[in-house]
Image (cartoon, helix red, strand yellow):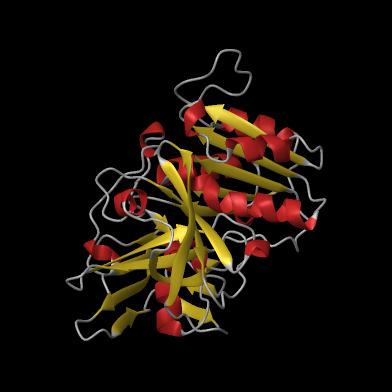
Amino acid sequence: MATLNWQIATVTAVRDETPRVKTLSLLVPGWQSHRPGQHVDIRLTAEDGYQAQRSYSIASAPNEQPVIDLSVERVEDGEVSPFLHDEVVVGDRFEVRGPIGGYFVWDGAATDPLLLVAGGSGVVPLMAMVRHRSHIGAAVPCTLLYSSRTPDDIIYADELARLGGRDDGLRVIHALTRVQAAGWTGYSRRIDMRMLGEVLEGTGRMAQAFVCGPTPLVESVAESLVNIGLAPGQVRTERFGPTGA
Amino acid sequence: MTDQSNQSVELDHEASDYEGADPLTLDANATAGMLMEIFGTEMTVAASRCTHCGNRAQVGSLRAYVHAPGIVLRCSTCTEVVLRIMRRPDGSYLVDARGAAYIRM
């Protein structure tokens, strides 16, 4: 088993995903290939030696290595995310360690249909799974149910529309909780048990579910899925809680 | 290094859409880096058994509370404490595993 060492990552690209989310591409020489769903710890050190450490999910599929993408949501009163948004430019370097975590991963080996449920920036590790599924040409049916507040808050919107339009077994279903565009035909409310039941009709009860987002959303979705009849072992969760930022 | 207990509480903007749950709860997956640091191997897929209720589950499925001075991992079934982890000033860790009947590694 590989040990977990801090490595130097160099920022190779920064791009805006939404008004609140940026993606940083990091070059990590000697990166040990990750599994979709894993995260990295990043560590920033100030000139006075003060250090701050956070975990961020990897958004990119393993085939992009040794470059990994992290999509970071800005939390206004946060300590790390405003720095990553406002200060970091191409060429900057900071420390990362990983890949980390073996529980919340899907690497294409399993054949059960996938139900991915995301709230806000909880879509990030699920996007790594969607991208990997597409890259390896997996035939496993996959449904992404993705809750955002407004159309402008949808991360990876264009790419999801493109991947979802390929007719290769990927369904992308959006729920917009606050603002909907004119002519919106998707869901216009928070994810609830009825919605999950409808989505599962097209997925099957054998689905392996991955749920990622803020803790209250994850609790609500996980409980609903079990009430609908999925076994607890079919539901894997990653609560963002308030530790990000 | 700073441990997570020093972090201020920062709520994700989506969180207020879903009420009723304790927003401070995380999955033990979030502590995977620290667990790997302590045990030297990936721990979130290791099987564990809760001393209190006997539930068998992968460590990654435990509930994590990281905002106290130290980290507490609780059983997802009975909510009792399975593991408690403290970082000492000298950098070493104290692991209280009374709540785990076993962890298979």
Q: Nearer the viewer, residue A57 or A24?
A: A24
Quarter of the image that includes the N terminus of chain A: bottom right
Residue A72 image offset from top left, x and y in percent: 43, 50
| One can see residue B8 in this view | yes
Reply above or below: A200 against A133.
above
User: For the point 41% across and 46% down, which residue is it?
Assistant: A215
Report the side of A51 relative to B28 (left or right).
left
Where on the picture, by quarter, is residue A166? top right
Number of marks drawn: 0
Report the side of A93 relative to A236 (left or right).
left
Q: Nearer the viewer, residue A121 or A112?
A: A121
User: For the point 68% across and 29% down, which residue is it?
Assistant: A198
Q: Nearer the viewer, residue A228 or A47?
A: A47
In the rendered image, the residue lying farthest to the left is A48
Residue A197 image offset from top left, x and y in percent: 65, 33
Reply above or below: A47 against A167.
below
| One can see residue B32 in this view | no
User: For the point 57% across and 71% down, which residue is it?
Assistant: B45
Residue B93 image offset from top left, x and y in percent: 30, 82
In the rendered image, the residue lying farthest to the front is A91
Report the side of A110 relative to A10 (left or right).
right
